[in-house]
Image (cartoon, rainbow, N blue to C red):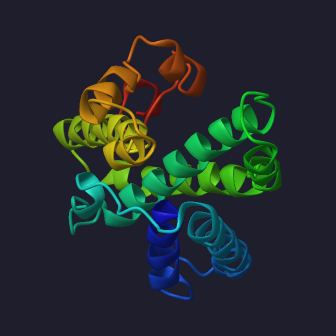
Amino acid sequence: MHGIRELLIEVTRRIHTAGFETPSEFFHHFIGEENEHMWFFAEFCLRYGGKIYRQPGGMTAEVPRSNLESLLVFTRILIFEELVDHFNSAMAVDERLNETIRAINRIHQDESRHIAFGRELVKALFAEVKQSSTEQELQDLAAYIRRYMTFSFESLYNPQVYRDAGVANASSCVHSCWPRRSGPSWSRAVPEDTQLPGEDGDH
């Protein structure tokens, strides 16, 4: 839910502004659909969990104010959409989960239009940034995105959720659950041949 709020804020800031004339029509549909998703997930959290957990701290405030800003914003949105789609697909068919949870994941499962659009937009934004960036700046960009991918995985594991579920040593449990760069969860969601803006395959 927090990820949806972030992407809605950033897309709304750019709709019908210079440089985003072409995608603005799609932005309208995107905002409407994601707003419905956020309401849906908020209702689930409040009805079944009794609260909405706070967003983990970290890289949410680290987007630099520069010519890279829009590229980083939409790259982060794309990472969020890809990650959510991966886990929605897995959880929708996981028979260990309650049927209500599986049904919610089935409803939110198909993000293919948003992902396809996001990939094309990130590609176009990177083409512009690449023309005015140094090799070091492109390497820094790729490193930042890698850090954000790690943060995105780790933010899925909230210690307070484990405490509320009665799990002892919640923080230690969370750290043991974090997928590593070489772990199966990372490998399934991020194929080894994935290239990020700023890496060799992009310039």
In this rendering, the answer to whether 101 lies above or below 180 is: below
Q: Is residue 18 visible?
A: no
Q: Is residue 46 left or right of residue 128?
A: right
Of residues 59 and 169, which is closer to you in this image? 169
In this rendering, the answer to whether 116 lies above or below 6 is: above
In this rendering, the answer to whether 142 lies above or below 14 is: above
In the figure, residue 102 lies in which quadrant?
top right
The residue furthest left is: 136
Q: Is residue 149 left or right of residue 61?
A: right
Of residues 122 and 27, which is closer to you in this image? 27
Of residues 187 and 141, which is closer to you in this image? 187
> Looking at the picture, how far across and down is residue 59, in whole percent?
25, 53
Of residues 145 and 124, which is closer to you in this image? 145
In the figure, residue 65 lies in which quadrant?
bottom left
Identify the residue at horizontal 46%, vertical 26% (top origin).
201
Identify the residue at horizontal 73%, vertical 48% (top origin).
101
> Looking at the picture, how far across and down is residue 45, in whole percent?
58, 64
In this rendering, the answer to whether 42 lies above or below 86 is: below
In the figure, residue 162 lies in which quadrant?
top left
Q: Is residue 37 visible?
A: yes
Labels in figure, total = 0
Q: Is residue 56 left or right of residue 64?
A: right
The residue furthest bottom is: 16
> Looking at the picture, how far across and down is residue 138, in whole percent?
27, 40
Instruction: Name the quadrant of the C terminus.
Output: top left
Identify the residue at horizontal 28%, vertical 65% (top origin).
67
> Looking at the picture, how far across and down is residue 197, in whole percent?
41, 40
